[in-house]
Image (cartoon, rainbow, N blue to C red):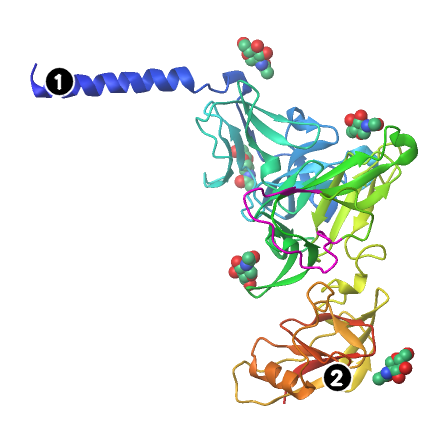
């Protein structure tokens, strides 16, 4: 045998082996389970959240009360999303999961599921807007489960891909955020693209961040450390859920590999908890008097975290708000950075004033922080005071900044720091907190004064 024919036959046989290997081990989607759906046709008649138009994709993707749809808040910009609720609810149907919110598709885009097992959303020009990346991984079918999880499974029923692994701004019951994973808010009700708030599972806990032009500011959250995941869940309080009700919870799972780090709070309490702790690994958000299995937790476009629960035993308005992080029953509403828009003074949950160099004026949505000249500039700055005011960054867990220092020293630090927009000075402890973003100020203890920077 010549070396040429030898290598040829080796080559041929390895091709044959490869062929048989592929054909015999990677199962395919049966031809009758494949589909190609075009985004076209009439819109649904009922109102949905964000005032969105929608097209239900197919009755194959319905599991009470969830269905898969194309929806849009802007003409010609469609999102493949999951709707929760039914038209007959006489309530807004909610959008609880998005596939492609940063890459909307146009009219006549296609959603296809081929024999290779990849689910692909392609725009009308063929550009792939989103896909599950599951080609040739043994996927044999697709299904929407009753808990709202869209799954691609193999011949043994194992999930090769699931929407529960790809949260956007919402957690359905049973859905988790894993270490370094996050929820990201929408930009606004009308704009579904990534907004400026995120809820991240990191080394400081389940933390809320505000993206202040690229700088991430931790504005609240649940403290804790060494968690590998946090799951949103609900359970009946005891065997008779009818009498005792249900709890809405966050369950935390420890990261066994990382060493325990000292708790940031002196009490040793792990996650921020204003309700009784069910067990060491559970935060009870709220108790409700009905079956809360159909609930979702969402990081809203205003930076608040809310839970909504679906109760189909009532004739209308089936979704109820069952928890809000910034609320009269959890963390004070005035602590929400966006509570008074871009600037304002908040007292007992209400925006009461627009602070100005001439004192407190009536608050309106037009209230704006003072304009600062570009920095670093030689131009001088000065400050005006807001008496008896704190900032959302003044918190028990994070402290009131550095000190004791003199108020003049605090002011100098802020003046030298281009990112500093003002500072909070505690007269009793002489603590100094520089703030990179103004937002909502909180009328509180009279031993705290806020200073707002402005250009002279
Ligand atoms: C697809 O075909 C298989 C085998 O012919 C059959 O068992 C199955 O019911 C079909 N599925 C659908 C959705 O028609
Ligand atoms: C979508 O496709 C249909 C059928 O090809 C065509 O009649 C229609 O004009 C298309 N719509 C848009 C907006 O391109
Ligand atoms: C923060 O916002 C900036 C735009 O202002 C963006 O470029 C950046 O990716 C965002 N960062 C995060 C972590 O969201
Ligand atoms: C609670 O609701 C879920 C979903 O509707 C249902 O599957 C479950 O059986 C209910 N549980 C009880 C105890 O009623
Ligand atoms: C702050 O309030 C306390 C108690 O109401 C009062 O005694 C004190 O004079 C006030 N201090 C200032 C600076 O207004």
Is residue 132 depicted above or below 405 in this figure? Answer: above
Report the magenta residues as a range.
251-272
Q: Look at mark 2 in the image and give the residue it sits on.
A: 385
Question: Which residue is situated farthest in the left direction here?
Answer: 2
Position in image of residue 251 (x %, y %): 70, 41
Is residue 331 depicted above or below 22 in this figure? Answer: below
Count neighbours of disc 1 (C-alpha within 10 A) and say few if under 14, some if 14 to 19, many if 20 or more.
few
Is residue 154 depicted above or below 344 in this figure? Answer: above
Q: 48 or 328, which is in the foreground?
A: 328
Q: 232 or 100, which is in the foreground?
A: 232
Position in image of residue 71 (x %, y %): 65, 41
Asked if residue 267 lies in the magenta stretch, the reply is yes
Quadrant placement of the N terminus: top left
Q: What element carries label 1?
A: helix
Question: Alpha-carbon distance for marks 2 and 1?
Answer: 88 Å
Q: How many labels does the image show?
A: 2
* Mark carried by residue 82: none
Q: Is mark 2 on a helix, strand or loop?
A: strand
Q: Look at mark 1 in the image and give the residue it sits on.
A: 6
Picture residue at 81% right of the left edge, 80% below the top: 361
Q: Quadrant of residue 45?
A: top right
Residue 315 visible in this rendered orientation of the protein: no
State whether the magenta stretch is mostly helix, strand or loop: loop
Picture residue at 63% right of the left edge, 34% below the top: 41
Residue 323 visible in this rendered orientation of the protein: yes
């Amino acid at each position: 045998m010549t070396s040429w024919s030898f290598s040829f036959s080796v080559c041929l046989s390895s091709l044959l082996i490869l062929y048989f290997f592929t054909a015999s081990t990677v199962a395919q989607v049966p031809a009758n389970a494949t589909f190609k759906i075009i985004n076209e046709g009439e819109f649904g008649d009922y109102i949905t959240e964000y005032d969105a138009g929608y097209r239900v994709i197919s009755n194959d993707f319905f599991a009470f009360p969830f269905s898969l749809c194309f929806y849009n808040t802007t003409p010609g910009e469609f999102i493949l999303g999951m709707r929760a609720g039914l038209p007959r609810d006489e309530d807004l149907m909610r959008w609880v999961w998005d596939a492609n919110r940063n890459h909307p598709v146009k009219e006549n885009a296609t959603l296809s599921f081929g024999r290779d097992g990849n689910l692909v959303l392609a725009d009308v020009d063929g550009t792939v807007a989103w896909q599950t990346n599951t080609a040739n991984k043994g996927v044999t079918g697709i299904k929407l489960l009753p808990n709202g999880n869209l799954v691609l499974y193999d011949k043994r029923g194992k999930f090769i891909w699931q929407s529960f692994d790809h949260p956007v701004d919402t957690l359905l019951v049973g859905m988790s955020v894993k270490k370094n994973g996050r929820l990201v808010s929408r930009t606004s009700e009308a704009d579904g693209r990534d907004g400026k708030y995120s809820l991240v599972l990191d080394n400081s806990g389940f933390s809320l961040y505000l993206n202040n032009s690229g700088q991430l500011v931790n504005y609240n959250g649940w403290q804790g450390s060494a968690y590998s995941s946090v799951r949103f869940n609900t359970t009946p309080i005891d065997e008779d859920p009818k009498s005792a009700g249900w709890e809405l919870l966050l369950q935390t799972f420890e990261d066994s590999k990382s060493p325990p780090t000292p708790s940031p709070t002196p009490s040793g309490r792990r996650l921020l908890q204003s309700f009784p702790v069910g067990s060491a690994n559970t935060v009870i958000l709220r108790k409700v008097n009905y079956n809360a299995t159909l609930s979702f937790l969402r990081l809203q476009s205003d930076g608040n975290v809310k839970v909504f629960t679906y109760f189909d035993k009532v004739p209308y308005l089936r979704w109820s708000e069952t928890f809000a992080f910034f609320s009269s029953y959890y963390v004070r509403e005035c602590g929400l950075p966006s509570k008074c828009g871009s600037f304002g003074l908040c007292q007992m949950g209400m925006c009461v004033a627009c602070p100005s160099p001439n004192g407190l004026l009536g608050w309106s949505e037009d209230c704006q922080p003072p304009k600062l000249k570009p920095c670093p500039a030689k131009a001088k700055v000065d400050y005006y005071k807001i008496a008896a005011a704190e900032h959302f960054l003044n918190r028990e867990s994070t402290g009131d900044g550095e000190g004791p220092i003199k108020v003049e020293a605090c002011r100098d630090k802020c003046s030298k720091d281009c990112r500093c927009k003002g500072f909070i000075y505690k007269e009793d402890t002489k603590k100094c907190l520089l703030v990179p973003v103004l937002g909502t100020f909180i009328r509180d203890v009279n031993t705290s004064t806020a200073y707002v920077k402005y250009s002279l």
